[in-house]
Each structure stands twice: as C-alpha cells, then as structure tokens.
Image (cartoon, grey):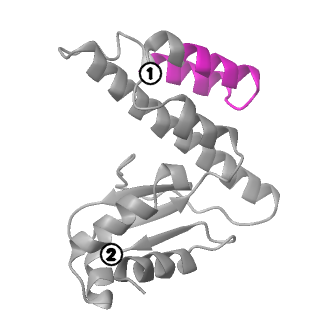
Amino acid sequence: MRLSDSIERFIKTMISQDEPEVELKRNELAEYFGCAPSQINYVLATRFTVDDGYVIESRRGGGGYIRIVRVIQAGSKFRYLITERIGDTIGEMEAGKLIGQLEEERLLTGCEADVMRAAMSAQALSVPMPDVMKDALRAKILKAMLTSVARKNREAQNCKEGRAASPPREGDDAYAL
C-alpha cells in the first residue's frame, strides 16, 4: 500500500458518522508516518477536496492545526452547487440568481441571502483587478459561504437528533484549502 493511501485511510478512520470532523497537527502526522509535511499536504489537497465532501480549515503558528470537516453529504444541493454549478468563476448576476433560488427553496434564510448578495456585489469587489479575477474571487467566496451554511445546517440537524454540535473555535481561518 502506498504512503498516500495509508495517510488517507488513517484520516478517514478518524472521521466517523458521529464525529464528522477531526483536528490534526501536520508535523505530528508527518512524524507518525515518517514523511515530510509536504506529503501530508499532498494527501489533503488531493483526497480531501470539496468534490469529495470535505473542507480543510487551518490555523497557522505554534498552536496551529488542520481541521478536516466532512460537511456535505452525497446528493446534497450544496454539494452540487459547490462542485458543479458555481465552477471556478461566477458573475454577480448569476450569483444573485443562485442565492435567490436557495432563498426560495428555504435553504438560506433571508438574512443569509442578504449577506451573500452584499458579498457578491460589484461594490464589495471594487478593487483594481480584471473582471475575470473578480469572478474567480466571487466564486471562492460564494463556495466558502455555502460550505459554512451546509456545516451550520448539519450541526442544527445533529442538535435535533440529540447529538452535540462542535462549538466554533477562536482563531480559525475562514476557508483554507
């Protein structure tokens, strides 16, 4: 078995139905497997992607960590949006329509939709860069927001089912892949 496969299997074993996220220290994991931290980065970047239903959150520094969160279940509307419909770029009008559809389907609250529209606006992205770069940035921001909503929805569902939700942690980076 290849090292990458072993690292992937180890991490996936730590993530279960009841605990859909795990916190790891990259250097400790590299030491455990006797490899360079870049090997851990490779596994995270190729085997724990949004397409696979995972989000990697990280905090750098001395007490830094990597949090791997399984937030999107197969067949989910959010998974489809994040992996297929949004793509690498999205324009302001298309993003607005998408947000409106999610609000109509009650997958977003009115407040969430308003915040997302504001973040997608030309005014919010009025920085000196080409429009294609703004659309790429807009897509990344929208994907991050939808991932956050999917995670919140999952935690709310866990509460309804009597499972404890994990509290937010201070100092987390918003969305790092």
Q: Position of residue 116 (x, y in %)?
A: 51, 24
* Residue 119 to residue 63: above or below: above
Q: What residue is shown with label 2?
A: 25
Q: Residue at 52%, 49% (x, y): give it.
A: 51
Q: Which mark is residue 110?
A: none
Question: Disc 1 residue type?
Answer: Ile
In this rendering, would 29 be left or right of 146? left
Mark 2 falls on what kind of element?
A: loop
Separation of disc 2 and disc 1 at Cα?
A: 34 Å
In which image quadrant can residue 166 be found? bottom right
Looking at the image, is 50 positioned above or below residue 59?
A: above
Callout 1 secondary element: loop
Residue drawn at point x = 61 percent, y = 43 percent = 79
Give the residue drawn at x 67%, y 29%: 108
Q: Amino acid under label 2?
A: Lys
- The region drawn magenta spans 96-119
Q: Looking at the image, is mark 2 or mark 1 nearer the viewer?
A: 1
**108 relative position to 22: left or right:** right
Q: Position of residue 99 (x, y in %)?
A: 60, 21
* Magenta stretch secondary structure, dominant: helix
Q: Earlier in the sequence, mark 2 or mark 1?
A: 2
Residue most extreme to the left: 128
Mark 1 residue crowding within 10 angstroms, few (<14) / some (14–19) / many (20+) = many
| Residue 105 is a magenta residue | yes
Residue at far right of view: 161
- Count the marks: 2
Report x, y in % for residue 45.
36, 59
Q: Residues within 10 Å of mark 2 (few under 14, many from 20)?
A: some
Q: Please give the residue where the numbered disc 1 appears in the rendered image.
A: 90
Looking at this view, is 38 or 154 the one in front?
38
